[in-house]
Image: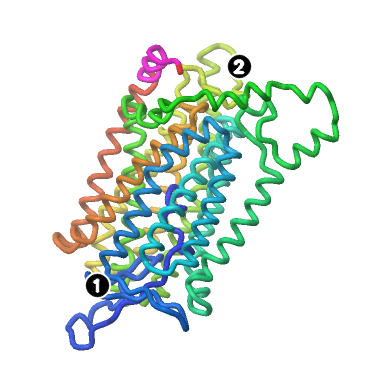
Amino acid sequence: MNDSDGNNSTCTSLPIKKNVPNNNNDNEQSIEKGDIVEEFIEEERPISIKQEGKDEFNSTASIVNISVAGHTAVYAFFPTISGVLADIWGRRLVVLIALLITMVSCIGIALSSNVYVLIIMRMFEAVGGGTLKIAGRGIISDISLPATRAKYTAYSFIGAQVSMVTGPAIGGLIAQQLSWRWIFWILICITGLVFIITIIYLPETIDTLIGGYYNLSLLQYIQKQKSNNNDNHDMGGNNTKQLWMKKTVSDFKTPYRYFMFPDFVLIMLISGIHFGLIICYMVHLSYLFQDYYQMNVQNVGLCFLVLGIGDIIGAICGAHYQDFVFHKVIKAYSSKMNEAVVFDTNKSLPIDFPIYKARLFYIWPCSIVIQLGTLVFGWLFIMKTHLAIPLIILFFLSFTMAIVDDATLCLTQDLQPDKVGAISGSLNLVQGIFGGIVTVIVEPLSSSIGVGWTYTLLGSVLMTTNIMLLVLLRNGVAWRIQREEKDPS
């Protein structure tokens, strides 16, 4: 569930309170609806974003939905641009720009005088957050080998998950004791600190740019000046600086070219469907716990800790197991080739290497657990089982979904190590589309056919990924060979 890190951060959401009617039968139902990020409100009922001692923002549920939709859309689509820029300009420069955008947007949100300014600033914040996620994926891919990539990806994922687990409590405390604006002032300070650390320490990680001393960190610049070696003054720097300047607009079409290749389409569909399920749980769980277990917002937030803990443990355990499986596949491949095969670079693997088996074969049990858990999940609430039962199932669902997400992400990077930013942008777009669809339909669907059948339907959709996995394992290598022959780039 690491692809939800930036899009569901509680610290960047505003506390929203709804006016509860006093003479309505709805009083017997949940009076606060929402996810861990914000309390849901009744349609078209006025709401207020309050700041103690200052003016209020008065708006409607429709405006709030526009804010969420705008943030989600930008977060989904903009990485298709920033991912390409990260491949062309380098990771370091794009990270610095994204951090600046994030700081400016947080300042705009903290100083916003009306809800429309806030919505625009939130969209700019999505630009920074989405760009940081894509650039981060590129850095991990640049510095890791295929045999250890899953482990590094999982470790980088822990920070985002810890934020998701602790964000609701910290953000709520700040908003309650100070105001919601203070959340963004604190974020400005944290982002500024990261910006300074990045300037000092973060080097460029793309090989073609490293050789030319392109975009040095402050520490690298000082070391270079101290060395005062003539050989270090001309290492192709001018050529590497011209590398991205010569790129054309056609490079921005790269993320969309992947939709022409069947293996990439199936990988992104598998990832997108599972990501949509993650968003479904994030959005819908608050309704379920409040309506069926009469839990307040604070207790619902505690239940979401199960998702975060399951994510973290699943990512770490799955990554180590994935690396173990990868080494086994390498041994089998070496035996087949009658020679020892060592992958000591992060460049493209041999074209006939069974990379699809190495990344996808072991996730079959995880997929089955997710499907079975989803099929029965809704019925647990209808049957009013003990609260521990849905929480246990949630833990195993988040545990296994983290493994599936890590596997599909690593596979896309294995297939396109020189264009990680572009392929990550494509993957992020598909995930965003599925996440947006689920966000729109899950509550109306639940109201129409019931909670039990809603999750049974979702589980049935998930079962289609079994066919996709089977097709990829059977035809993936052949498709890759065919693609490389037609387009070696």
Image height of 288 relative to 78, above or below: below
- Residue 335 visible to an observer of this rendering: yes
- Residue 295 visible to an observer of this rendering: no
Residue 340 - label? 2
- For mark 2, give the secondary structure: loop
Image coordinates for residue 414, horizontal then vertical, percent: 49, 29
**Front-lying residue, 30 or 196:** 196
Q: Nearer the viewer, mark 2 or mark 1?
A: 1
From the viewer's perspective, tell me whether residue 234 is left or right of residue 303: right
Magenta-highlighted residues: 478-488
In which quarter of the view is residue 408 placed?
Answer: top left
Instruction: Write the residue at 38% across / 17% down.
Output: 483
Instruction: Write the residue at 50% across / 26% down.
Output: 329
Q: Earlier in the sequence, mark 2 or mark 1?
A: 1
**Front-lying residue, 205 or 315:** 205
Image coordinates for residue 480, horizontal then vertical, percent: 39, 20
Q: Is residue 485 magenta?
A: yes
Please report contact status of discs 2 and 1: CB closer than 8 Å, yes or no: no
- For mark 1, give the secondary structure: loop
From the viewer's perspective, tell me whether residue 470 is left or right of residue 206: left
From the viewer's perspective, tell me whether residue 471 is left or right of residue 222: left
Residue ranking furthest to the bottom = 23
From the viewer's perspective, tell me whether residue 374 is left or right of residue 353: left
Badge 2 amino acid: Ala
